[in-house]
Amino acid sequence: MLKILLSCYTKNGEKPYEPRWKPISDANFIAKFENKELPTYVRKSENGFEIDIVNAYYTRLSADWQNENKAAAEVVAKIIASKEQLTRDEI
């Protein structure tokens, strides 16, 4: 899992994946960036702040996106744990 998280950046810091911008609803996260220079994984749009959920480390995601990713991982973990052996179609 750690290897997957760390692999989103190349050695020279370039982002190898197309950004996937999603709105941020976490007010505490947004407050950290008000009137400051934004990191490359956060941008301001017409509708507020957005985060690139593909190229940001999990720990740098806003709380709303961390919760969403964690919930999805828990569902997948339960499915895998409930199977003695997965078929090729289930992988």
Image (spheres, rainbow, N blue to C red):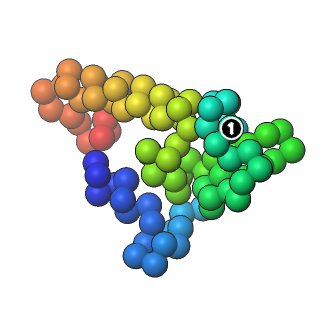
The vertical placement of 37 against 65, above or below, is: below
Q: Nearer the viewer, residue 48 or 79?
A: 48
Tell me where residue 23 appears, x and y as whole percent.
Answer: 70, 38
Tell me where residue 71 appears, x and y as whole percent.
Answer: 42, 26
Query: Horizontal placement of 84 versus 62: left or right?
Result: left
The quarter of the displayed image where residue 27 is located: top right
Tell me the amino acid under the disc marked 1. Ala
The vertical placement of 45 against 9, above or below, is: above
What residue is drawn where x is 70% and y is 59%? 37
The vertical placement of 62 against 74, above or below, is: below
Few, some or many C-alpha atoms within 10 Å of disc 1 (few <14, some 14-19, many ≥20)?
Answer: few
Query: Horizontal placement of 62 versus 86: left or right?
Result: right
The residue that mark 1 highlights is 31
What residue is drawn where x is 64% and y is 43%? 32
- Image quadrant where one finds the C terminus: top left
The vertical placement of 51 against 3, above or below, is: above
Query: Horizontal placement of 15 versus 51: left or right?
Result: left
Given the current orientation, which residue lies at the most extreme bottom position? Answer: 12
